[in-house]
Image: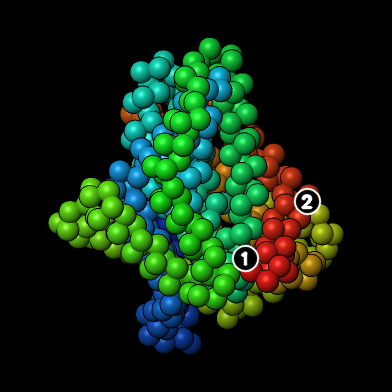
Amino acid sequence: MFILAAALIIGIAIAVPISYSIAISGTLYLLYDATLPWLVIAQRMVVGADSFTLLAIPLFLLAGALMAEGDITPRIMRFASSMVGHIRGGMAMVMVVSCMFFGAISGSGVADVAAIGSIMLPAMKEEKYRPAFSASLLGCGGALATIIPPSIVMVVLGVTMGASIGKLFIAGFIPGILSGGSLMAISYYFARKENYPRLPKADAREKWEAFKGAFLPMVTPAIIIVGILQGIFTATEAGGVAAFYALILSKYVYRKLTWRRFFEICLEVAKTSAVVLFIIAAASLFGWILTSQNIPQKIAEAILSVSDNYWVVLIFFNLLLLVLGTFMETTAIILIVIPIFMPIMTQIGVDPIHLGVMICVNMAVGANTPPLGVDLMTACKVADIAYEDSFRYIFYFLAAMTLVLILIIIFPALSTWLPEMVVDSGA
C-alpha cells in the first residue's frame, strides 16, 4: 500500500491534477502487484462511471448553463434586490440571495460564482465596494450551491453512500438558509464598518413585478424536489426535466437562446462533465484497491481503538474533511473518504442524511479555503484580483460558515427534521 499512498501524495504535491494523481497511483499499484491482471484498471474505471444516477450531473449542469444564458440571472437579481437591497450593504445582501436562488437552479458552485459574479461584481465596484470583499463574498455565496438542492455534490454523495438523493435535497434547505444568513450577517458587519450604501427600498408594485419576472426560473427546484418525492421521476430524470424546462424558458419564453449557442453550451457541459466523471472513474479504481486490501476496515478498527465516542469520531471526521478540502477537489474527497468512514459512521449510529449534509457544508467551506479553494479562485478571477488579496476578508466568511457546520454537527435535527416531516406527511 506504500506505493499507492506515495504516488497519490507525490502527485498532489507536484500539482498533478487530482484525477490523474488518483488514476496513476491506482495504476502503479496494480502494475506492481503481479497477482492482478492489468485489465482490472479499465474494468474498474468503467464500472465506476457506469451509473444511471450519475447522468444527473451533466443534465443539471446543462440546466444551469441554459438558465444562465437565458437572461434568468438578472431576473433573479432584480427579485433579490427588491427583497433585501434596502438593508445596509444592500448589494452584498443581493449577491448572497442571488447565489442562493441560482444555486437552487444550477447545483454547481463554480457555475454560481461565474453567473452571479459577471453581473454583480462590476456593479459593486461602481458602488465603491472593495473588490477583495466582493470576491470573498462571491466565492462563499457561490459555494451555497453545494448545500442547497439540487446540489451535484449531493448526487455524488447519494450514489456513494447509497442514500436517498431526494431526502438529501430536502435536508439541504435549512443548512443552506443558515449558511446564507451567516454570510449576510458578516456582510452587514463590514457594510457598517466600511460604510457601504443601501439600495432604494422597493415598493409593493416593484416587488410584485420583480417576483413575476423571476417566478418561472424559481419554479425549477420545486419541480425537481416534488417530482422526486412523488415518485414521478428519478434524480436523473429530474435533471432531464430541469434541462428541458430551462431550454423552453431560454429559447421560447425569453427568446435569448439560439440553436447554435445551444450546441456550444452542450459541448461546454460535455467537457465539464467528462472531468467530473473521470474523477469518479479514477476514484472507483482507487476505492476498489482499498476495499480489496481491507483498508477501510483496518482504518475503522484503528480509529475506534482510540475512541468509539460519537462526538470524538464526528469531530475527527470533520477536521479531516476541512484539511482535505483545502487542497483536494470535492468529488475526489467524497469518493476516497466516504467508503473508508461509512462503516465507522454506521457503527456509531450517524444518520446517513445528517452525514451527507455535514459533508456538503464542509465541502462548501473547503471550496473557499486556501491554498486550493476552487470557488474562491474562480471568484478572484472574475473579480480580476490576486488570489491572496481576498485573504483580508475570506476568513471572516469561512468562520461564519464553520459556525453553521458546528451547529449542524451538534444538532442533527437541523438536517434530518425536514426530510422526516415531508416523508411522514406522505409527500
**Mark 1: few, some, or many residues within 10 Å (few <14, many ≥20)?**
many
Q: Is residue 28 above or below residue 37?
A: above
The quadrant the C terminus occupies is bottom right
**Badge nearest the viewer, 1 or 2:** 1
Residue 330 vs residue 196, the one in the foreground? 196
Please, what is the three-letter code of the amino acid marked with disc 1? Lys
Q: Name the element at disc 1.
A: helix
Q: Evaluate whether residue 382 shows in this view.
A: no
Which residue has dot 2 on it?
411
Q: Earlier in the sequence, mark 1 or mark 2?
A: 1
Please, what is the three-letter code of the amino acid marked with disc 2? Phe
Q: Quadrant of residue 387?
A: top left
Q: Evaluate whether residue 166 shows in this view.
A: yes
Q: CA distance from mark 1 to mark 2?
A: 18 Å
User: Which numbered disc covers residue 167?
Assistant: 1
Tell me residue 155's x, y (percent): 51, 65
